[in-house]
Image: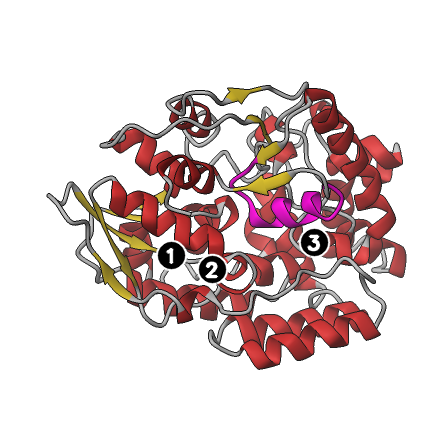
């Protein structure tokens, strides 16, 4: 993922303006300079052609992007806009400032070394002291997922399938209830689940920060573990982790890296957990749940064609429940991983539209496959529950 490797792709931008309709930042700021096509132009001029100086404003524009990938989905030329912006951040040496320093510490010293809950708690305290996000800091779970489950969890009856479960950082440290639901629901439906030892952060947060060295280290560790597993699939409950493992991992490594063959092998087995179960099919009919729910579709959804609709199909089997669609279920919530930490006012404006859309449904539960969205929406949805689709299914089975 070197910026010069995207020089030819940059020329494909025809300035059609399709990204205007889907860029959350532009739709709030209404500044042409904050639109994807302008960022692409700026990156080419300042970092490739060197015809513009790299000023503070140039850095601000490059960093004021959620990397939601909506412009990439919309672009008729197929530009990998998110990768170009991440490569530009790497060219600039990554993000700077107090927030950038703290996040680099988290990425390098914590998320790539699981089990350091004590350090995580100190990091949370440091973030609050720096006044980066004030009250909007995720609360760490009393016990991380990897201290609750390990090894192989087998169903009581016939094994229909065997999967490895890649547990994202959010599910490990913040939402182990999601991880427990994934394991219990899969096992309940005849799937043997293996929790690989030694797995670390998927690498996407580091890539988004422009810290490609840390991203490469994450990919290297995970691929060496996952590639050798004799399983039918590798599932994850986080759509961002899935995107990284299936699509982006190969991009952060050099093209001639010996690990590329392992990356390809792993990529072919990656599934979002609800999508996998929906494709496999339920073995046991869920029990009734008298709940009205709505579905927030995560931004990082385009890496598999069935991700978007799988929760709708899967949860339609739960009698007594009712799905009430939002007007714009796929509209960004404004979290952008840790983007909201440094762009609080912008993220809050983006989130406000999603909150209005949710309120209009009258639903008491919000379903989403993104833990970052779950946290950022949940901060304001005090009167509603936000959960992964498989947690909803686990409730219907009486497993949680």
Q: Secondary structure at mark 2?
A: loop
Indicate which disc, 3 or 1, sits on the residue closer to the N terminus: 3
Of residue 330 and residue 315, the one placed in the foreground of this image is 315
x and y, in percent, of residue 56 in the image: 88, 60
Q: Which residue is mark 3?
A: 48
Residue 272 in view in this figure = no
Q: Is residue 168 left or right of residue 31?
A: left
Indicate which disc, 2 or 3, sits on the residue closer to the N terminus: 3
Q: Residue at x 54, y 21 (%)?
A: 323
Q: Which residue is mark 1?
A: 166
x and y, in percent, of residue 333 in the image: 70, 38
x and y, in percent, of residue 233 in the image: 26, 46
- Between the C-alphas of marks 2 and 1, the distance is 9 Å
Q: For residue 136, which quarter of the picture? A: bottom right
Q: Answer whether residue 35 is magenta in the image.
A: no
- Please give the range of residues in magenta: 367-381
Disc 2 or disc 1, which is closer to the eye? Answer: 1
Q: Is residue 352 left or right of residue 87?
A: right
295 above or below 370? above
Residue 162 in view in this figure = yes
Q: Which residue is mark 2?
A: 202
């Amino acid at each position: 993922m070197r910026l010069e490797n995207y020089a030819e792709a940059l020329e494909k931008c025809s300035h059609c303006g399709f990204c205007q309709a889907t860029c959350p930042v532009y739709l709030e700021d209404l500044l042409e300079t904050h639109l994807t096509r302008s960022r692409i132009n700026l990156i080419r001029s300042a970092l490739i052609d060197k015809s513009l100086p790299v000023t503070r404003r140039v850095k601000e524009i490059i960093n004021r992007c959620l990397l939601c990938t909506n412009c990439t989905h919309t672009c008729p030329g197929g530009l990998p806009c998110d990768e170009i912006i991440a490569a530009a951040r790497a060219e600039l040496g990554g993000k700077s400032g107090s927030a950038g320093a703290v996040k680099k510490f988290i990425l390098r010293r914590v998320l790539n070394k699981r089990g350091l809950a004590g350090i995580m708690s100190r990091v949370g305290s440091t973030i609050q002291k720096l006044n980066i996000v004030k009250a909007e800091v995720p609360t760490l779970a009393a016990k991380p997922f990897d201290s609750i489950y390990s090894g192989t969890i087998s169903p009581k009856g016939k094994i229909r399938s065997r999967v490895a479960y890649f547990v994202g950082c959010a599910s490990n440290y913040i939402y182990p209830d999601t991880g427990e639901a994934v394991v219990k629901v899969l096992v309940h439906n005849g799937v043997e689940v293996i929790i690989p030892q030694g797995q670390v952060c998927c690498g996407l947060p580091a890539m988004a920060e422009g810290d490609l060295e840390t991203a490469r280290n994450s990919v290297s560790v995970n691929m060496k573990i996952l590639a050798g597993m004799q399983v039918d699939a590798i599932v994850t409950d986080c759509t961002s982790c899935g995107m990284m493992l299936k699509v982006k991992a190969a991009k952060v490594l050099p093209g001639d890296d010996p690990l590329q063959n392992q990356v390809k092998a792993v990529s072919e087995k990656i599934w979002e957990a609800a999508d996998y179960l929906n494709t496999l099919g339920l073995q046991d009919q869920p029990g009734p749940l008298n709940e009205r729910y709505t579905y927030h579709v995560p931004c990082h959804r385009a890496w598999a064609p069935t991700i978007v609709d799988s929760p709708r199909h899967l949860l339609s089997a739960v009698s007594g429940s009712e799905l009430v669609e939002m007007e714009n279920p796929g509209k960004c919530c404004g979290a952008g991983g840790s983007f909201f930490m440094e762009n609080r006012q912008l993220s809050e404006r983006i989130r406000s539209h999603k909150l209005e859309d949710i309120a209009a449904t009258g639903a008491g539960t919000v379903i989403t496959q993104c833990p970052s969205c779950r946290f950022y929406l949940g901060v304001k949805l005090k009167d509603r529950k936000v959960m992964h689709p498989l947690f909803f299914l686990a409730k219907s089975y009486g497993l949680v």
